[in-house]
Image: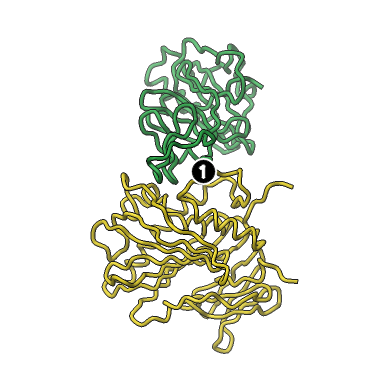
Chain colours: A yellow, B green
Amino acid sequence: MTDPIRDEWYPVALVSQLGPEGRDTRLLGEPVRVAWQDGAIIVTSGGHTLPSQQRYGHVWACPGTPARPLFDIPEADQPGRRLVDVGLVRVKCSPLRAVENFLDIAHFPFVHTDILGAEPHTEVGKYDVAIREEVDEVWATKVHFYQPQAAKSAAGGITTEYMYRVPAPTVSILYKTCPPRPGEWDVITLFVQPLDEELCEVWPWMALFDDDTPMTDLIHFQQTIFLQDRSILENQLPHRLPLDPGMEIPTRADLTSIAYRRWLKRRGYTYGAQLVAA
Amino acid sequence: MPDWTPVALLRDLPPLVVMPVTVDGVDLALWRSASGRIAAWADRCPHRGMRLSHGFVRGEALSCIYHGWSYAQSGQCQRIPAHPDLEPPEAIRVPVHHATEAGGVIWVALDTVTTAPPALAGVQPLRSVTLDARFDPASAGLTESGGAWRGTLGGVAVAVLVQPLPDNRCALHVLAESKASPTDLVAASRGIETLRRQAEGVSA
């Protein structure tokens, strides 16, 4: 029998930072070990070797039987991009809350003040959201927002265009206007490792057109943003993401979040979610 | 269960400040508007569940730190910054509880109030302290009188208000006799510290 939660791919380590000692971590509440063996990386749990692969800088593992291949990010192989392993931020929140926050732009002026947003530029215009049935992914497009400093490479305020993509329940990919390379999109991802239903490790990863900014500054920029998000994520009640309407009241700006919740429910992905008490 | 629970000294909540407090196990956002009005609300924004005690006060409204949704004194949402031209639906409302000030102390009642909070005469606010332990006023030599525990700390007459907190913790809000000198207040404050250490079982 297939289990929509166990049959997903999850990030469990950064390839570039996996030392000879390996990494002991957790996935869906169970202990997992990531280790080198004869020059290869293997992932084990409870005496079993899990399906695993290396992609987008990370080691990915599946606790069950993979329901489909790991999602594709074609831009990852595009020449000229810098691939940035940001590292991890541990957040005491539901993995689904972490993804939903990543899909949200309306909080920029208040949480990422003077970086990704600033009052009085708070308005979220109309944008398009769809569950793309042919690929079974959530997409938000034509998202525009005024940003004081959209990226490390941006000088001064610009209106940034975004696209958001949710290819797996605990993964979100953001495509965003690329200041030095009009016509291309910078790619910023959020790979979330669910340790348990109310604790996760967030692995941001980027594929950018930016030849100038030192790697340290790129990493610090993203870490600043995610630490600001953490102060929100650890203080939302209930801790688990409510999938049924009633507990939280959305507005027009939340169309992506509404589609994400609906898509999770439809797929039966309830790990880290709160359903109405039976 | 008394109607009113002491939650803070008024001086610790200046205008334009919001803080978290707990009454009967319920988390609240206690805040004071620019004009000095005090309010105690459910500590949760109806939008995405963020704690309102992390928010900010502007004028007579409390705003959530997550998306800046602001709420009027009635608890009704009055502005959604993502949609400045939208009049927020009436359903977007934060549950409001009773809050008032008496004798330099802020009191909160979750439900219907049938009495006024105790009027404490002849005392001035000193300080609040949180104990990581239960507190037994009688064993500290205090006796109940007029809605407060009375006795001496550091040789100074005091009135102590006890606010029970979850996990066997509590807060004490301490007032000292009005005629106490600055030196007396320092002594009383040290007395509070000693009392806290004794209650927590920490050696002095």
Residue in view at x 28 percent, y 75 percent: A211
Q: Is any atom of residue B109 visible in this view?
A: yes
Give the quarter of the image for residue A168: bottom right
| Residue B154 in view | no
Left or right, A186 with respect to A153, comes to right
Q: Name the residue furthest bottom.
A: A38
What x and y, as percent, mark residue A192?
Answer: 53, 65
Image quadrant containing the N terminus of chain B: top right
Looking at the picture, tell me which residue is in the foreground, B118 or A254: A254
Residue B2 image point, x, y percent: 63, 20
**Residue where numbered disc 1 is placed:** B47
Q: Position of residue A138 (x, y in %)?
A: 53, 63
Q: Residues within 10 Å of mark 1 (few under 14, many from 20)?
A: some
Label 1 marks a residue whose chain is: B
Figure check: B116 above or below A180: above
**Relative vertical location of residue A161 with respect to residue B198 in this rendering, above or below:** below
Numbered circles on residues, count: 1
Q: Residue at x 30, y 57 (%)?
A: A159
Q: What residue sits 35% from the left and 72% below the top?
A: A208
Nearest to the observer: residue A146 or residue A195: A146
Residue placed furthest toward the left = A155
Task: Tell me where residue A181 sits by quadrant.
Answer: bottom left
Q: Amino acid at mark 1?
A: His
Give whichever of B185, B73 is nearer the camera: B73
Q: State the SS at label 1.
A: loop
Relative vertical location of residue B23 with respect to residue A113 in this rendering, above or below: above
Q: Position of residue B118 (x, y in %)?
A: 55, 14
